[in-house]
Image: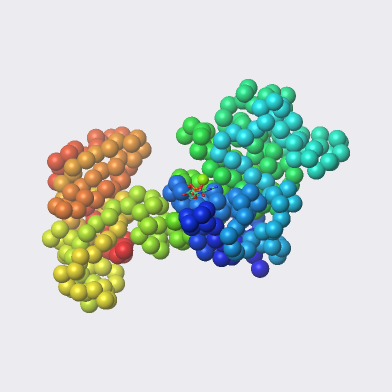
Amino acid sequence: MAFLEISHLQKSFGTNRVVRDFNLDIEKGEFVSFLGPSGCGKTTVLRMVAGFEVPTSGSIRIDGQDIVNLKPNQRNIGMVFQAYALFPNMTVAQNVAFGLRVSRKSKAEIDATVTEMLDLIRLGHLRDRYPYQLSGGQQQRVALARALATKPQVLLLDEPLSALDAKIRVSLREEIRAIQQKLGITTIFVTHDQEEALSISDRIVVMSEGHAEQIGTPFDIYNRPASRFVASFVGTLNLLEGKVDDAQKGVIDLDGNRITLAQPLSGHKKGETLALALRPEAVTIDPHKAHDTAIEGTINDVHFLGSVIRTRVSLGKNNISLDMFNNPGSPPPARGEKVKISFAAKDLLVL
Ligand code: ADP
Ligand code: MG
């Protein structure tokens, strides 16, 4: 039995089926991200776990107990929202103390917990400030401290970083992950940002149209996408079109180049069009690192991104983006330059 079990969860608003047969088991202490495009139902699932929304059907169990019929305040859950939801007329310390006051803890206990929580988010020196006197990142740390103060069984974070600047977003996500690990608290983190999900999760649930499209570790989700949707939503992907040349031997034609895949193309016919995918980092134009495949192409775009140079090579009909590392000793490639690209046949995914 998993610590948090969501089974056959459904939610409709009128005729709009927003969550469809959503199933997920989360182990105690796990950090799981919901990743998916806007409108796919991430917030709705979270709100059902928190008790702000009643499921149309299905069950949600924490530690074996079905909580679907419990009110939000009867559930032992902490939540942080995207927009700063601090009480504007309360100080930092009062905000953090809020849930403890509601549950009528003693003053001594409240004071001790507030101090402990403010130490955890390293904002003890700002305890008497008001929210408007804090930066966005500080406000979200206070929101986190407030959510954790009641020692919830489960922590729910709904895009807590999306209103922040890129730099703060990265440092705060690392801080959230460190705090989560320190406390060992079971956490669901909602995001539409794949890099965020990949970098801090134990597992990721890729969501599409109200259901879990794939559930797996960041490594699996990225390297073994179970569907075309996952492959194109997570990471940058070259989507290519080839033709079957010899199905039994797994040979395809990619803009006039014959490439032998790692597996035969069972169920495909010669001449059939194939959708293929290739990650930019699987491709190299380093002539000394030739893989099984070396194909001639022409550079038609160069983006200097700093440490990485994203280069696009045209093979004819297909374009392949690839990443080169910046080398301070040599200038980036130029448009129009003819190059040989190579990649391992096993990295070419048939979708
Ligand atoms: P996400 O968080 O993934 O962006 P949401 O869960 O917020 O998605 O929304 C999923 C869908 O449910 C959207 O189409 C949204 O318009 C709809 N929806 C959410 N809440 C309500 C509601 N209270 N009433 C009607 N429709 C809603
Ligand atoms: Mg949302």
Residue at position x 86%, y 36% in the image = 108
Closer to us: 181 or 111: 111
Residue at position x 46%, y 52% in the image = 40
How many numbered marks, from 0 up?
A: 0
The colour style of the image is rainbow
Left or right: 324 with respect to 106?
Answer: left
Q: Position of residue 275 (x, y in %)?
A: 26, 62
> To which quarter of the image does residue 264 belong?
bottom left
Closer to us: 256 or 210: 210
Q: Position of residue 261 (x, y in %)?
A: 26, 68
Q: Is residue 207 visible from the viewing direction of this image? A: no
Q: Position of residue 57 (x, y in %)?
A: 59, 63
Q: Is residue 169 above or below residue 242?
A: above
Give the position of the N terminus as an image quadrant.
bottom right
Residue at position x 52%, y 64% in the image = 21
Q: Position of residue 251 (x, y in %)?
A: 20, 70
Give the position of the C terminus as an image quadrant.
bottom left
Left or right: 274 with respect to 236?
Answer: left
Q: Is residue 16 visible from the viewing direction of this image? A: yes
Q: Is residue 168 above or below residue 150?
A: above
Q: Which residue occupies the extreme front position in the image?
A: 14
